[in-house]
Image: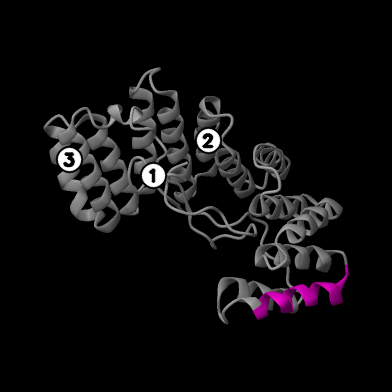
Amino acid sequence: MFLGSGFRAAAFVLPALVVVATWSASAQDLGAFATSPDNLRLYTECMSLARRDPMRTLPQAESWLSKGGGFGARHCLAIATFEAGRHAQAAGEFEAIARDMGQDRPGIRGELWAQAGQAWLAAGQAEKAAAAQSRALDLKQNDADLWVDRALSYATLNDWPRAVSDLDHALALRANDVEILVLRSAAWRFAGNLSRSLADAQLALKLAPDNTGALLERGFTQLALGETVRAQADFNKVKSLVPPGSEADKRAQAGLRGEQPERNLPATASRPAAAAGEKR
């Protein structure tokens, strides 16, 4: 997707991470947003300002739109609206742009639906998020990040079978991805399948032995299995790897107290694309 610069984190806990995705359109596709060199310059400047100062960007983008800025102005306006904290409004704007593009440029329309999904999730409307992400997947079935995004929405709805299924699709596209394995481990644990949860956590740690998300997930799964000593070893290792007071440290401390995390997937607040042409 294209809401910022990062991925998801390691355990289904809200609100821990910022889910961001970046615009991945080709230069040719950017014709939808920048129909001339001047428009490309305006679009790039507007998107950059939207990140730094969304409130100042809003009237500028509206002015540009009134002067014929087209999809570029509308997209920048939607980004600024999101950055200003108006997530539901931004989601509607992303969806409207995708619809108004007709049948052209399916890749960009898929990104717009993905952005709408992340905005709906940030607005606390997971059902609308999943619906938008389904529209995105109709256009971009081979995008592993999109499958993860919808899994996060299903997790928010406590629909663990669908969350696991979407993470299966993501791993089929990106085999042995440690972060996705940790997410699926958490999803299996919340679905009540501790053996599969443990297997995913173990594989993640085989690939990345010091991955704190995987250590936390294995610890919580071991705790659920009654393997307290093993769980405590994982939680103590996390504490040795992360700064005191960090989110991971707090979760490890909770595990050492015998507490299980809330039933939810790793944290997600979405940010729309910083600028056209950026890679995710």
Which residue is painted at 20% across and 50% down in the image? 57
Task: Point out residue 178 in the picture as x, y percentages from the top left corner.
Answer: 67, 54
Looking at the image, which residue sits at the far top? 103
* Amino acid type shown at disc 1: Glu
Task: Point out residue 215 in the picture as x, y percentages from the top left corner.
Answer: 72, 67
- Per the model, the C-alpha gap separating discs 2 and 1 is 20 Å
* Amino acid type shown at disc 2: Gln
* SS of the residue under disc 1: loop
* SS of the residue under disc 3: helix
* SS of the residue under disc 2: helix
Magenta stretch in the rendered image = 226-240
Q: Which residue is mark 1?
A: 278
In the picture, measured across the screen, residue 19 lies left or right of residue 11, that is left
- Per the model, the C-alpha gap separating discs 3 and 1 is 24 Å
Q: Which residue is mark 3?
A: 62
Above or below 134: residue 279: below
Task: Point out residue 174 in the picture as x, y percentages from the top left corner.
Answer: 65, 42
Q: Are marks 3 and 1 in contact (CB under 8 Å)?
A: no
Q: What is the number of the mark on residue 133?
A: 2
In the picture, measured across the screen, residue 225 lies left or right of residue 148, that is right
Which residue is painted at 22% across and 46% down in the image? 46
Classify residue 96 by image quadrant: top left
- Badge 2: residue crowd in 10 Å (few <14, some 14–19, many ≥20): many
Q: Earlier in the sequence, mark 2 or mark 1?
A: 2
Q: Earlier in the sequence, mark 2 or mark 3?
A: 3
